[in-house]
Amino acid sequence: MQRQFDDLMLGSIELFCLAGELGGFTAAATAAGVTPAAVSRSVARLEARLGVRLFVRTTRNIRLTEAGRVYLDQSRQALAQFAEAEQMATGQQGRAAGRLRISVPTTYAHYRLLPLLPAFHREHPDVLLDLHISNRNIAFADDAFDLAIRVRAQADSTMIVRHLEDAALVVIASPAYMERRAVPRTLADLAALECIQFDLPSSGRRIPWLFREDGDDVEFEAESAFTVGEDVLGGVTLARAGAGVFQTYRFIVERELAEGTLVELLPTYAGRSRPFNLLYPHSRFVPLRVRAFIDFLTARVAADG
């Protein structure tokens, strides 16, 4: 078979991927232990070979072109496949290794995922975990993520969606807040209370409260003096401090409900939930570190459920 890549070209691809993932030639040079000029020459070598611009360069920063984003995505997969082939050839195919980038919402991170990660690290000590804890949607190709956990999974043929769990919803308040007010018996009674609201980061739209009334799924919206954006845990903190009532995931507050430091309202209207899903790019090749994490997380969530 005729050679298409020499050692210099393969090294250039590796440096390009580092520059694309880290967002700069200097950062890539530091990570690789070379000079920024060496990274710049490697990228120029690739651009000359391909006949396209991979980066837009300004005096202050660089950014990937559309062609660069596509090339980065495909090159990362190819390099990962090379690494896996080496592991298989040396008899290490059972050992997951490498950096794993995960995007996860704040609620699921703090109350579900992060407590599990020490156990994952004990099972797979060669996997380096890079966690992006945010409620903002990410672009896999642009941000070089391997996996994401999200409530809403958009229909996308390029993504594989694995359902993790349906997280039950509950309306909460502090005992001190409810001492001064009548306990609501119906959804209409919520109008007399301060119903803390949350705006979706992706759209800025207010997220409705979900209930089940006489077997039907219903939504409730209200005005409030308190509206939280970005981090839904802010609504929980406000309710805990006595600012009003809030609907959140039961797994966040189950301990406080059991201890009585928070109280549940309208339990006869409960029964609704929101799904959490695991997303990753559709590809013929899934790195071992990604497969190991998927298997670990789905097994642990199923066991806890």
Image: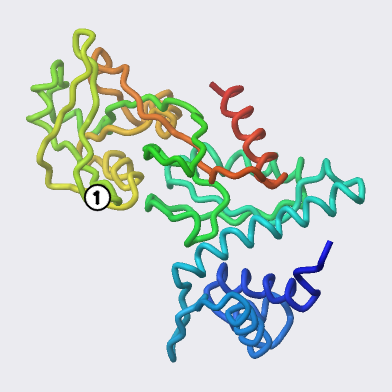
Which residue has dot 1 on it? 203
Q: How many marks do you count on the picture?
A: 1
Residue at the (32%, 17%) spot, across then down: 271
Does residue 9 lie above or below 34 as drawn?
above
**Left of 190 or right of it: where is 68?**
right
Label 1 residue SS:
loop
Is residue 250 or residue 125 the one in the foreground? 125
Residue at the (22%, 34%) spot, across then down: 245
Is residue 36 or residue 250 the one in the foreground? 36
Does residue 23 lie above or below 168 as drawn?
below
Does residue 182 lie above or below 48 as drawn?
above
Residue at the (31%, 52%) spot, across then down: 230
**Residue type beneath disc 1:** Ser
From the top left corner, tell me how far across and down residue 56 is, in percent.
45, 80
From the top left corner, tell me how far across and down residue 23 is, in percent.
52, 74
**Left of 293 or right of it: where is 55?**
left
The part of the image, by quadrant, that contains residue 216 is top left
Residue at the (72%, 51%) spot, across then down: 127
| Few, some or many residues within 10 Å of mark 1 (<14, 14–19, 20+) | few
Does residue 80 lie above or below 170 as drawn?
below
Residue most extreme to the right: 90
Is residue 135 or residue 71 the one in the foreground? 71
